[in-house]
Image: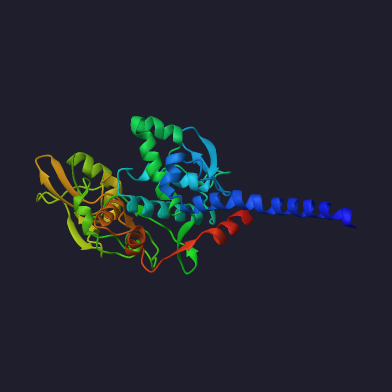
Amino acid sequence: MKQLKPVVIIFSIFICIIFIVPTLLVLPFSSDNEQTSLHEKLEKAPGIEQLADSVEVAVYRSGKEVIEKLPLEQYVVGVVAGEMPADFEMEALKAQALAARTFIVNQMMSEDPSVPKGADVTDTISHQVFKNPSELSSLWGADYEWKLKKISEAVLETKGQVLTYDGKPITAAFFSTSNGYTENSEAYWSNEIPYLRSVNSPWDKQSPKFTDQKIISIAEFEQKLGVKLAKDGSVGTITSRTEGKRVANVDINGKSFTGREIRDKLELRSSDFSWYLKDNHIVISTKGYGHGVGMSQYGANGMAKEGMDYKEIVTHYYKDVEITGSEKLLQKVTAQR
């Protein structure tokens, strides 16, 4: 028995080394990782490769008519890059990332007959504009690295977050520039959606897209609208406006149109318009750019410039919503596949 003691002692020391040494090796690095900021991580590994995600998005690339599959968070990077200028404030980019992620999660949980078979979403304004790294490199040139890094950071800092109403992802509509107000959903679409309500958006006045003017001939105006102008020199009478101060209805020589119909048919930037006749042309002035429902991108940037964070931005434009984790929602998406 006495001869076994050294063996037992040596074995005990060996066991201690097995447990203690890995601890000594792991603990310092774990501490460093916890203290490493997101900015430092991006400095060491710029780009979107670290935005790996188990859920894939199948994007129909309309230009090449092919389906491109990529992790969800990398898809969000491509949408933010395609939908919002990279030189916008970081908090505005985060708000856009949150809206883009919410949109795609909602899209993947729904059935959309407009999407080609095998795809979840298209890369057009019918859904969300999407650009992959190769396209962004061509688009941005020498600015590619810093722009991609900045947008990737915005996506990382909101990773996994979505906007919900009554526990379900919202229709996170967004557009470029308001006329000073956003629009109620039913003023543009058929359904009244409780979180898409008209709110003030005074920051948009600083947008380069706040006002626009379009001049078209009388002949083109009459042809596109299927009308004949009155001989008294009038163009048409605006009979009502929406809560968002856009044209709700207009009468042109006895024929009625909605503001949206006029905007669509004449390809105007906004349905907040005024017009007058000059010689053989009609001069049309508009305020804002886009449908006006949901989050204004230039409004979000203005809020960010005033020091508001992305949570304040999204809860201003989407009423009574919550920011929640997407894990359970994505589990449903995975189960459906």
In front of the other: 157 or 320: 157
In front of the other: 32 or 310: 32
Point out residue 180 in the picture as x, y percentages from the top left corner: 22, 58
In front of the other: 308 or 129: 308
Answer left or right for 168 relative to 206: right
Work out which quarter of the rendered image holds the N terminus and state it. Answer: bottom right
Q: Residue at x 79, y 52 (%)?
A: 11
Point out residue 35 in the picture as x, y percentages from the top left corner: 46, 53
The correct choice, above or below, for 316 with respect to 333 in the image is below
| Residue 127 makes an appearance in the image | no
**Coloring scheme of the render?**
rainbow
| Residue 202 makes an appearance in the image | yes
Q: Residue at x 65, y 50 (%)?
A: 21
Q: Residue at x 33, y 52 (%)?
A: 92
The correct choice, above or below, for 319 with respect to 79 in the image is below
Point out residue 117 in the picture as x, y percentages from the top left corner: 57, 44
In front of the other: 17 or 143: 17
The quadrant holding residue 172 is: bottom left
Total count of labels: 0
The quadrant holding residue 258 is: bottom left
Answer left or right for 131 relative to 57: left
Point out residue 259 in the picture as x, y percentages from the top left corner: 26, 55
Give the residue at the far right of this rendering: 1
Answer left or right for 28 relative to 335: left
